[in-house]
Image (cartoon, rainbow, N blue to C red):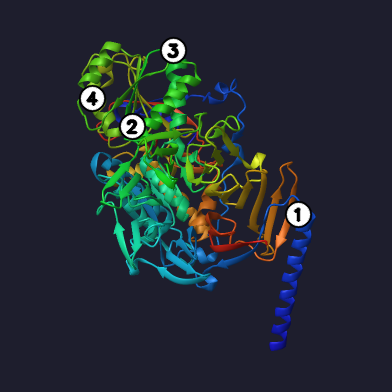
Amino acid sequence: MRIAAQLRKVSSQWRALLGAGLLVLAAAGAAAQNPPLYTKWVNYTQANGFPAGEVFCVTVDGSRVWAGTEHGLVLLEDGRVKKIFTTADGMVSNAVMSVAVDKQTGDVWIATFGGASVYSAGQFRNYTSLSSGLANDLVYGVAVQGKYVWLATTAGASRLNTYNGSWSIFNETNAPFQEPWAYSIAVSAKKVYIAAWGGGVVVYDIAGQYWRPYTDPDGEMEIVLYRNQGLIHNIVSSVSYNPDTKMFWASTYFGLSGYDGRNWHNYLTKDSGLISNFINGVQSRGNEVWACTQGGLSELDYKTNTWVTYRPDRKTGRGEVLITYPDGKKSRMETPTSLAHNYILNMDFQGKDIWVATAQGLSHGIRQP
Amino acid sequence: MAKSFPRIFAKPLAVAVLLCAMVGSVAVTCAQNRKNSPQPYASIATNGVSYAGPGREAAYDLSGPVIHIGLLAPLHGPQKAEGEAMVAAAQMALHDMAQKTLPGGRRVALVVGDESGPSWGHISDVLLHLVFVEQSVAVVTSTSGDAAHISEQVGNRIGVPILTLSSDATTTQVDVPWIFRMGPSDALAAQTIAQEMYRNRGFKQVLLITERDHDGRVGGAALQQAARGLGAPAPDALVLDSLQPDFGPLLARMQAQSPQAIVLWTQPETAGRLMQAIWKTEVRAPIYLSPKAAQAGSGLDFPAPDALGKKGSGSAGVWTVVSGEKIAGVQNGFARRYRQATGTSPSPAAAETYDAMCLIVRALRTTGANRARVRDQIARVKDFPGDSGTISFDDEGNNPTSIHLVRLERRTSPVAIFEAVK
C-alpha cells in the first residue's frame, strides 16, 4: 500500500512537472507578447480549515490577509489561517462583505450584513443603525479616507468622523444618488467614489464638498447605445480608483467601465477578452485592471489592450489561462493549479501576488517570475 | 378558462361583479417605437441572464425536516390589507400543495416577515432573518419596489431566489439571475395605459400623479417614456408628498387644467384617498391606476356608475391593468375558495402570491431543498397555468404575460379585480 501511494505521489509530481513544462513551452512561444502571468495558485477552502461557501471580499494589509465570508472574518498571516473571527468574538455579524484597514492606526473596519465593526487593539466595537449614525445594517462596502470612514449601505453612504465620532448620511435626498442603495466605496486623496444603484458612480470632492454623478447617458437599462458612450450601466456593483493612472473603474452586471477624466473606456465580452459581463468587483493598479466576474478573473493590461483570464477547468481541475491579444487573436494555456472557483467576487494585491475571493474559497495567485 | 369566460356576461351585473368590463388586450407598441432608433451596441436581452456560481451541489442543500419559504409582506399600516391577502393566499397554496409530500417526507412551512416599519433598517433586518435564521429556500416579496430591490441584492450575494410582486421594471433590468417578477412590469403597464389614452382615445392632456418614493419615480418615468414612445405630448406630472395629505392645491390645479385623463402611480392607500377627493370635485376625467395603486388596501369605494355619467362612455371610470390572457382567478377554484376563507375576493397580489408559492413548492419537489437548484427550476418555468394567468419566465426573469385594461366599478370591499367565474 505504501509503495502504491509513493508511486501515485511520484506520478502526480511528474504530471505537475509536465504541466508546468507545457505551460513554460507554450508561454515561451508567445513570450514576446504575453503579459506577466499567474501560474501557481494556492487555495484556502473548507478542505484545509477555511470556512465553507463564498468568500465575499479580501483585503491585504502587508503580510496579513483579511477575508470576509458568510461564516466570519478570516485572518491569514504568512499564508496560514491564524484566526476566524465571528460574533462569538464580538463582531456584529458573521456575514462579512468588505474590509478596510486604516493605515494610520492599524484599525480594521468591517462591513457586514448586520452593521459595521472595527477591530482595534484586539477588540471589536460595533455600529448598527440603532446604536449609531449608520444608515442601515446592510453594509456592502467600507473605505478609510483620512479621519473619515465611509460605509456603503442599502440606505445610503454613511461617513464617520473618527476624531469626534460624528456621523453624516448621504443618500438620494442630499446627493445625486437617485436611489439610496450604495454598494461599494473607493477613495483617493481628493475624492470618494461610491457605486450607487441607479445613480451610477457618485463622486464626492473632498475639498469642494460637492457631489458629481456619472451615469449611463443612454437612459436605458437594458442596452448600451454606443460603445464608449459613458458609464455602461447605472447599476454599479463596485468601484475602484487607480492612483497610478488617476482613473476610476466601475464594474456592472453588464460590463466594465473606466473613466480617465476625459473619456470613457467600456468593455463587453463581445469586443474584448472580458470573460463575462456579470462583474462583481473591480480593482486596478498600474496598467492592470482586474474584473471579478462570474466566469473567471479577467485582467486587462490597459496600456497594451491585452486580456488574460484565469479560471479553473471544471473537467480537469487544472487552471486555464486565456489570453486575448490586441489584434483579437487568442491563445490558451493550462496550469497545474487553478483558482478555487470561476465565480469571482473580489481581489486584492500583495506585491506582485494577488489574492482572490471566490464563491468556493480564497485563492492566492503567484506571478510567474 | 376559455369556456368560462363568456359566463361572466351571463351573470347578473348586480350580483356580479366588482370587476365590470374588460376591454381587449392592448397591443404593446414598444417594438414599433424603436424602429427608428439606432441599433444599440449591446443588449442585455440578447445576452440572457445566467448564474455561473456554485450552490447546486448536495453540500449546499438545506437540512432539517421542515423547509421554509419566506414571505416579505406588509402586515401593518396602509398596506396591511395587501399583506394579509398575501399571507392568506400563501397559506392556501401550501395547503393545496401539501397534498403531495416532498422527497424524504419533508414538510414546507411559511415564514412571514413584516416589511412594514418606519425605516429601511426594518425591511433589511426582517429579510436577513428570513434568509439566515429561517434559512428560507426562497423569498416572495410584496408589491413594494424597495423590498424587491433589497431582497434582490441580498439574494444575489447570498444566493436566494426572489419571486417578487413588484411591478418595478428595473428589478429585472440589472442582469441579476436570482429575481423573478410574477406580474406585469411598470413599463408594460405604462405602455398599455399610454396606448389606450393617447392612441385609442386620442387624449392630449394627461395628468400624471406620482408619489415621492421609489415606486412613484420609476413608474412615473415609465409612463413618461411610454408617452414619448408614442410621440404623444408629455403628461403634466405632479409629485405627491405622502406626508402632506392635503390635496387642496392639487385639486385646485386639477380643476383649472381639466385634464382629459388622470394617471395615479401611487400607493394604493393614497390612490383611494385621492380618488375620493377627486370625485367630490367637478373633475370627471377617467382615472388610470398603476398595478400597485389598484392593490388591496386602497380602501377604494367606487361611486355608482350613474354618479359618473354615462356608463362606458369613456368619459369617466377607473381603469387599471391586469395580467393574463383571460380573467384570472378561476384555476382550481382559487378565487371561490379564497373568498370562502377570507370573506373577500382575491386581489392581484393574492393571486400572484398563490402562484409564487406553488412554483416554489413545485420546484422543491423536483430539485429538493437547494436554493440554486430551485432558482434553476423556476427559471425554466414555461406556460404554468397560474391563478394570476399563464406564467412563463424569460431570460431576464420577467413574466412576459399579456396584459389587459379593466374597468373597475363600485365595490364595497377591498379591491377585487379577480372575480371567480363559476
Residue A120, picture quadrant: bottom left
Residue B8, picture quadrant: top left
> Which amino acid lies under the numbered mark 2 shown in the image of this protein?
Ala
Whether labels 4 and 3 belong to a single chain: the reply is yes
Residue A16, picture quadrant: bottom right
Binning the other alpha carbons within 10 Å of mark 3 as few (below 14), some (14 to 19) or many (20 upward) gives few
The residue that label 3 is drawn on is: B202
- The residues bearing labels 2 and 4 have C-alpha atoms spaced at a distance of 14 Å
Q: Chain of mark 4?
A: B
Does residue B279 appear in this view?
no
- The residues bearing labels 1 and 3 have C-alpha atoms spaced at a distance of 69 Å
Q: Residue at x 46, y 30 (%)?
A: B187
Between label 1 and label 2, give the one nearer the viewer: 1
Whole-percent x and y of residue B12? 33, 27
Mark toward the start of the polypeptide (3 vs 2):
3
Whole-percent x and y of residue B372? 51, 56
Q: Chain of mark 2?
A: B
The residue that label 2 is drawn on is: B293
- Name the quarter where the C terminus of chain A is drawn: bottom right
Disc marking residue B276: 4
Q: Residue at x 43, y 23 (%)?
A: B224
Q: As displayed, is residue B209 above or below residue A74? A: above
